[in-house]
């Protein structure tokens, strides 16, 4: 049996223990509060990364489905579309031949152009020119002039002197660590390019640049800044994926897929049936025109 005094004593003791625990908890919460900003950011970054991964998987899955359906669409229905275009061109040409009307002739030319794709510039001129103009060999042949070889560069004495000085000072083998070697490699590549062109002015600029020393490293961002930057990048990436997903959904093939998500093959069969009916109709029309 517990006496009132004992109960009170136990209550006091329990309260003290609870207070002690509460004090410990308060200290832990204060400690947690100090560490919380970065921890909260890290949790937010992890959550955003996981969400983005799932979203990327969904978008890529849909893209592959659209691509596969587009390929099937082209394989199964492409010949039918081609046949329809050919029949429409022949019908237009038959009408133009019968009427001689300039408008009918124009329509016939347009219909035939849809059947025969426009050749590229390279195909038209068989390697003589591309979209940038005539090749040098073709230009020389047309103008009866020999193809000129690139002029030989002879660096000046001052350019040679600058080059030798820079090569000695900035040689990668003088580097003390890997970062310094990379910096020297990049710099010497620029020196070599300038010397190959005989560019004395640029070699002088490079000499002044080397004399000025390496550009001091920028202040590295804090952990919080890195996490905020990561969150911003993840948000931008998600926005970009949203645009990609919207374009896929709004494309002709994407719209067709959305209409028949459960059975896209059946949709292809239905389209094929309609195209076959149109082909039969155009063939009958052409037969009628030809008598």
Image (cartoon, rainbow, N blue to C red):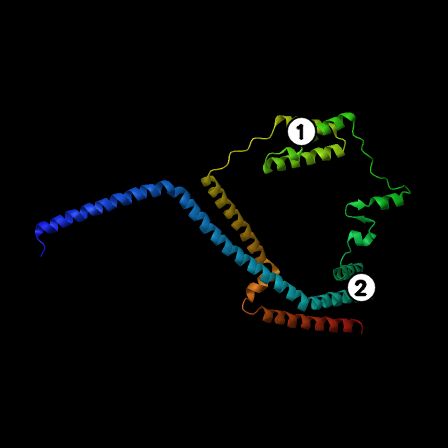
Please give the name of the residue rendered at 76% of the width and 25% of the height, measured from the top-left corner. 158
**Residue 190 location (% of width, % of height):** 69, 34
User: In the figure, 196 relative to 262: above or below?
Assistant: above
Q: Would you say 249 lies left or right of 154 here?
A: left
Point out which mark residue 80 bears. none
Please give the name of the residue rendered at 47% of the width and 50% of the height, measured from the top-left corner. 48
Residue nearer the viewer, 17 or 270: 17
Disc 2 packing (10 Å; few <14; some 14–19; many ≥20): some
- Proximity of marks 1 and 2: CB atoms separated by less than 8 Å: no
Say which residue label 2 marks.
96
**Residue 116 location (% of width, % of height):** 77, 61
Task: Give the structural element (helix, strand or loop) at label 1.
Answer: helix
User: In the figure, 124 relative to 225: above or below?
Assistant: below
Outermost residue on the right side: it is 144
> Which quarter shows the N terminus?
bottom left
C-alpha distance separating marks 1 and 2: 79 Å
> Which quarter shows the C terminus?
bottom right
Point out which mark residue 169 bears. 1
Residue nearer the viewer, 175 or 253: 175
Please give the name of the residue rendered at 71% of the width and 71% of the height, measured from the top-left corner. 279
**Residue 251 location (% of width, % of height):** 60, 58
Q: Counting residues from the N terminus, which is met first, the one under dot 1 or under dot 2?
A: 2
Residue nearer the viewer, 266 or 152: 152
Please give the name of the residue rendered at 10% of the width and 51% of the height, measured from the top-left corner. 6
Residue 272, quarter of the rendered image: bottom right
Q: Would you say 256 lies left or right of 115 here?
A: left
Q: How many marks?
A: 2
Q: Nearer the viewer, mark 1 or mark 2?
A: 1
**Residue 102 location (% of width, % of height):** 80, 59
Residue nearer the viewer, 198 or 84: 198
């Amino acid at each position: 049996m517990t006496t009132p005094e004992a109960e009170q004593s136990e209550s006091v003791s329990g309260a003290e223990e609870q207070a002690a625990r509460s004090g410990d908890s308060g200290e832990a919460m204060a400690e947690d509060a100090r560490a919380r900003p970065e921890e909260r950011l890290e949790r937010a970054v992890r959550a955003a990364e996981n969400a983005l991964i799932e979203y990327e998987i969904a978008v890529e899955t849909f893209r592959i489905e659209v691509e596969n359906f587009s390929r099937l669409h082209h394989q199964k229905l492409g010949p039918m579309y081609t046949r329809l275009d050919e029949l429409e061109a022949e019908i237009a040409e038959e009408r133009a031949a019968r009427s001689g009307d300039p408008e009918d002739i124009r329509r016939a030319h347009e219909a035939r152009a849809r059947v025969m794709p426009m050749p590229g510039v390279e195909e038209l001129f068989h390697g003589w020119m591309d979209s940038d103009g005539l090749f040098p060999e073709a230009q020389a042949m047309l103008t009866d002039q020999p193809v000129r070889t690139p002029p030989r560069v002879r660096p000046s004495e001052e350019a040679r002197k600058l080059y030798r000085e820079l090569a000695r000072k900035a040689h990668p083998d003088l580097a003390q660590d890997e970062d310094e070697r990379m910096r020297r490699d990049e710099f010497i590549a620029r020196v070599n390019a300038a010397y190959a062109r005989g560019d004395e002015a640029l070699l002088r600029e490079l000499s002044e640049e080397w004399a000025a020393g390496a550009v001091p490293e920028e202040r590295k961002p804090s952990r919080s800044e890195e996490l905020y930057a990561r969150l911003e990048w993840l948000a931008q990436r998600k926005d970009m994926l949203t645009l990609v997903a919207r374009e896929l959904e709004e494309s002709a093939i994407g719209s067709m897929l959305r209409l028949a998500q459960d059975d896209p093959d059946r949709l292809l069969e239905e389209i094929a049936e309609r195209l076959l009916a149109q082909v039969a109709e155009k063939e009958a029309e052409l037969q009628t025109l030809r008598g």
